[in-house]
């Protein structure tokens, strides 16, 4: 899953099957950085679907955690990889989401 977050030369991508976030250079698609994502939960992140950026520049994702029944909305710290779990996403069957640009 690849989401272009702003008109820059970088793209952020996540894996639907692991706890990784990738930063790619769009001029040559070289991998610039890999960030391992984690939460304060003892359970493992088993996948990430959908990324979005709010109007303040915060990055959010749909996070799948091993023992949770639903995907969780999580706010990603791009410096550390720590994900603050915000709430359960119901329904959980979607691939992407976006914030309205009216705030």
Image: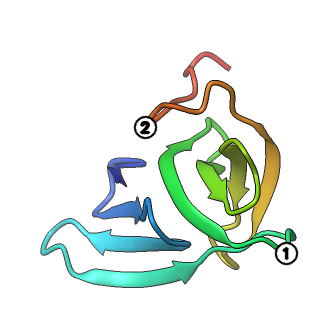
Q: Quadrant of residue 41?
A: bottom right
Tell me the residue at 76%/52% (across/down). Answer: 68
Give whichever of 92, 11 is nearer the camera: 92
Q: Earlier in the sequence, mark 2 or mark 1?
A: 1
Does residue 102 lie above or below 86 as drawn? above
Rendered image: mark on residue 95: 2
Tell me the residue at 28%/63% (across/down). Answer: 9
Neighbor class of circle 1 (other Cα within 10 Å; few <14, some 14-19, many 20+) is: few
Q: Quadrant of residue 79?
A: bottom right
Does residue 101 lie above or below 15 as drawn? above
Residue 36 on image: x %, y %: 58, 81
Rendered image: mark on residue 42: 1
Give whichever of 38, 101 is nearer the camera: 38
Q: Is residue 13 left or right of residue 21?
A: left
In the rendered image, the quadrant that contains the C terminus is top right
Tell me the residue at 69%/33% (across/down). Answer: 89
Is disc 2 in contact with disc 1, using a CB cutoff of under 8 Å?
Answer: no
Residue 10 on image: x %, y %: 33, 65
Give whichever of 46, 15 is nearer the camera: 46
Instruction: Name the residue at the left extreme.
Output: 28
Q: Secondary structure at mark 1?
A: loop
């Amino acid at each position: 899953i690849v989401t272009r977050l702003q008109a820059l030369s970088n793209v952020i991508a996540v894996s639907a099957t692991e706890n990784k976030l990738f930063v790619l250079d769009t001029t040559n698609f070289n991998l610039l950085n890999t960030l391992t994502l984690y939460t304060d939960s003892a359970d493992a992140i088993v996948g990430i679907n959908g990324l979005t950026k709010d109007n303040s520049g915060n990055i959010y994702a749909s996070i799948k955690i091993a023992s949770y029944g639903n995907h969780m909305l999580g706010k990603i710290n791009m410096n550390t990889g720590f994900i603050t779990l915000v709430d359960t996403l119901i329904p959980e069957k979607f691939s992407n989401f976006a914030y309205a640009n009216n705030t």
